Image (cartoon, helix red, strand yellow):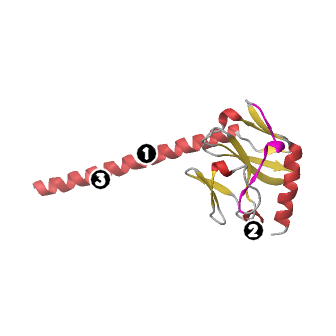
Amino acid sequence: MQKRFRIILVVVFAVALAVMCCFSACKFNDKKTAQDSELNKRNPVVVDQDLIILTKDITRNALFFPVEIDGMQMEVIAVKTPDGKIRTAFNACHVCYKLGNGYYVQVDTMLVCQRCKKRFRMDVIETKTGGCNPISIFAENKTETDLNIIISKEYLTQTATMFKSWEENK
């Protein structure tokens, strides 16, 4: 009798634990969806205009800003490095983007190209050009103030031309 009671108690405990895990996972997903939704409200797709990034929103977690210029879809990365500097780049691996899937995701404190899997520290952005590196947006291609970073439509249009030629050559 005692053995049967223990088995029933273990089963009830296991079921209760499974239910609690399911509720926790649902709550986490709801929070993540709410955060993603809030981020999209702050970072709507910029269409054929200057991209304005609020510096107060930039942290060590990379933010990705969708941009559409003349029908070309692009994305800008903005991140604050450990030294406090805000760095920006296009979300495109200089080499791999031409071949498809050459975009980055953040994994821990690194940006990882989804094609070649090369990893970059955030503080490398805006320091190197060419090769398998993020396409940096240097100081001369943006206006920085204490409140925001502005990447002009003119510069985005020039860059969109490069992205279009890459798309056509795939």
**Residue drawn at (77%, 60%), measured in percent from left and top?**
130
Q: Do the residues labelled 3 and 2 touch (CB within 8 Å)?
A: no
**Residue drawn at (85%, 53%), measured in percent from left and top?**
159
Q: Earlier in the sequence, mark 3 or mark 2?
A: 3
Query: Of residues 72 and 132, which is closer to you in this image?
Result: 132
Q: Which amino acid does label 3 sit on?
A: Ala
Q: Which amino acid does label 2 sit on?
A: Leu
Number of numbered markers: 3
Horizontal and vertical percent position of residue 9: 21, 51
Highlighted magenta segment, given as a residue range: 132-145
**Residue drawn at (85%, 60%), measured in percent from left and top?**
164
Q: Can residue 76 be seen in this view?
A: no
For the residues marked 3 and 2, what is the alpha-carbon distance in whole angstroms? 49 Å
Q: Which mark is residue 48?
A: none
Residue hosting label 1: 24
Q: Which amino acid does label 1 sit on?
A: Ser
For the residues marked 1 and 3, what is the alpha-carbon distance in whole angstroms? 15 Å
Residue hosting label 3: 14
